[in-house]
């Protein structure tokens, strides 16, 4: 099971995710109401961008806290392997 902890940007990440959640709901309503496909695609791109920015905040916290702590605790090989795996999945 993963460790549970908080970071510098936890509140900001939660707020961003709440906005994304609301945005996705409104896009769903756009689809239901038959709005123009171009408008829907623009909104989907905005959600994608918001999620990417949120991921960058999480990545920043991960580097500043998780990786630093693991290296300080002598777990650098495992920490770097986990980071590499997470980064590879994030930038796909």
Image: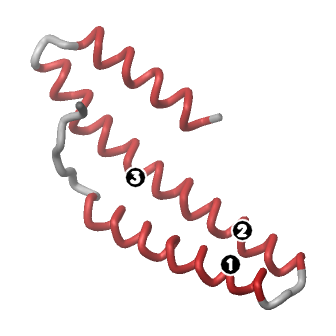
Extreme residue toward the front, this view: 32
Say which residue label 3 marks. 57
Viewer-proximal residue among 75 and 30: 30
Extreme residue toward the bottom, this view: 33
- Which is in the foreground here, disc 2 or disc 1? 1
Q: Residue at x 17, y 43 (%)?
A: 4
- Residue 14: x, y in percent? 33, 66
Q: Residue at x 22, y 55 (%)?
A: 8
Viewer-proximal residue among 88 and 72: 88
| Residue 46: quarter of image | bottom right
Say which residue label 2 marks. 44
Given contact means CB atoms under 8 Å apart, are the residues at marks 2 and 3 in contact?
A: no
Say which residue label 1 marks. 28
Compared to residue 10, the image places residue 47 above or below, namely: below
CA gap between label 1 and label 3 equals 26 Å
Pointer 2 local density, CA inside 10 Å: few below 14, some 14–19, many at least 20: some
Compared to residue 5, the image places residue 45 above or below, namely: below
- Residue 18: x, y in percent? 42, 73
**Secondary structure state at the residue bearing disc 2:** helix
Pointer 3 local density, CA inside 10 Å: few below 14, some 14–19, many at least 20: some
**Secondary structure state at the residue bearing disc 1:** helix
């Amino acid at each position: 099971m993963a460790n549970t902890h908080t970071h510098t940007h936890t509140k900001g990440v939660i707020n961003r995710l709440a906005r994304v959640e609301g945005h996705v709901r409104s896009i769903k309503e756009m689809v239901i109401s038959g709005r123009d496909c171009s408008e829907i695609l623009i909104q989907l791109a905005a959600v994608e961008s918001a999620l990417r920015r949120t991921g960058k905040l999480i990545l920043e916290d991960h580097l500043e806290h998780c990786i630093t702590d693991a290296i300080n605790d002598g777990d650098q090989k495992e920490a770097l392997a986990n980071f590499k795996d997470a980064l590879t999945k994030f930038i796909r």
